[in-house]
Image (cartoon, grey):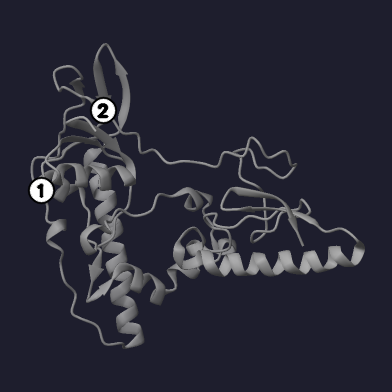
Amino acid sequence: MPPSGRASGQSGAQIAHELAAAGRDVLLATSRVPRVPRRYRGRDVHEWAVELGAYDQPAEAVTDPAEFTAPHPMLSGAHGGHTLSYQQLARDGVRLFGRLTGAEGGKLCFGPDLPGNMRYADAAAAQFRRMVDNYVARAGIVAAEPDADPAERPEPGLESPPESLDIRAEHIAAVIWCTGFGPDTGWLRVPVLRPYGAPAHTRGITAFPGLYVAGYPWLSNRGSGLLYGAAADAARVAQHVAAAGRSQVLTGAATSRIVASGTPMEGARR
């Protein structure tokens, strides 16, 4: 990695934080990404998410399709885990910009949306805290008192970031694109692929005989794309595969094709 790097997106915030901690000069093109406190009222954010039932929200209950592709909240698991915020990144020496909009004539151009991106992230963290506070009050459970995270302190001077910079003058040596990813299923010749490449399925079961998926986000619920929820989905799909295999044996057919987390295993005998 050259001495100077650039990044963007949710993963970009994590990478920018680690590069800055390593003494690198880092510029971050921000985006509209929510964040949550890593810990609140004595518990880790994932503990609260499990207790609140957030990961168990079924895909069928989602009313806004945009939720299926919404980015995960910013937070870090490094060194035991801690809160990530644009404000703290700025205090750590990361130079913040709005969304990268283009490059021309040796210059990078950015949108004016950094303040809005910060407000959006802060609002998501505040909403999470309200959810926890309301649950504690409603359930009457014992929990630590509401607390503030130093990483969320306001940081002045971020209201009007530059909207362009000179690549050569800034000595930009590397650009790290953290803009998300999608499935690469061009090799999969089946009539059940959606326009963006993912197989159409019902809780991991496709309409194509012998083709299953597991490990996909929102396979059955919000937790499906996380380690927390992948095991239950995989067990359910495996049960269906086994049942289908027994049925095939009875009818003389014994070949299946399985796709687990995007990895094909051809000719699996059942």
Other residues around mark 1 within 10 Å, as few (<14) / some (14–19) / many (≥20):
some
Taking 71 as reference, is 165 above or below it? above
Residue tagged 1 = 155
Q: Residues within 10 Å of mark 2 (few under 14, many from 20)?
A: some
Q: Which image quarter: residue 151?
A: bottom left
Splitting the image into 4 quarters, where does residue 171 fall? top left
Q: Which residue is mark 2?
A: 174
Measuring 40% from the left and 49% from the top, which residue is drawn there? 71
- Secondary structure type for disc 2: strand
Quarter of the N terminus within the rendering: top left
Say whether residue 140 is visible: yes
Residue pushed farthest top? 105
Residue at 24% across, 49% down:
119
Q: Could you tell me residue 52's position as x and y percent?
A: 40, 74
- What is the x, y in percent for residue 138? 35, 84
User: As drawn, is 91 to the left or to the right of 84?
Assistant: left
Residue at the image position 13 percent from the left and 40 percent from the top: 158
From the top left corner, tell me how far across and down residue 226 is, in percent: 45, 61
Badge nearest the viewer, 2 or 1: 2
The alpha-carbon separation of the residues under discs 2 and 1 comes to 27 Å
Q: Is residue 170 left or right of residue 67?
A: left
Name which of mark 2 and mark 1 comes first in the sequence: 1
Image label count: 2
Q: Is residue 32 visible?
A: no
Q: Secondary structure at mark 1?
A: loop
Task: Name the amino acid, label 1.
Answer: Glu
Q: Nearer the viewer, residue 178 or 98?
A: 178
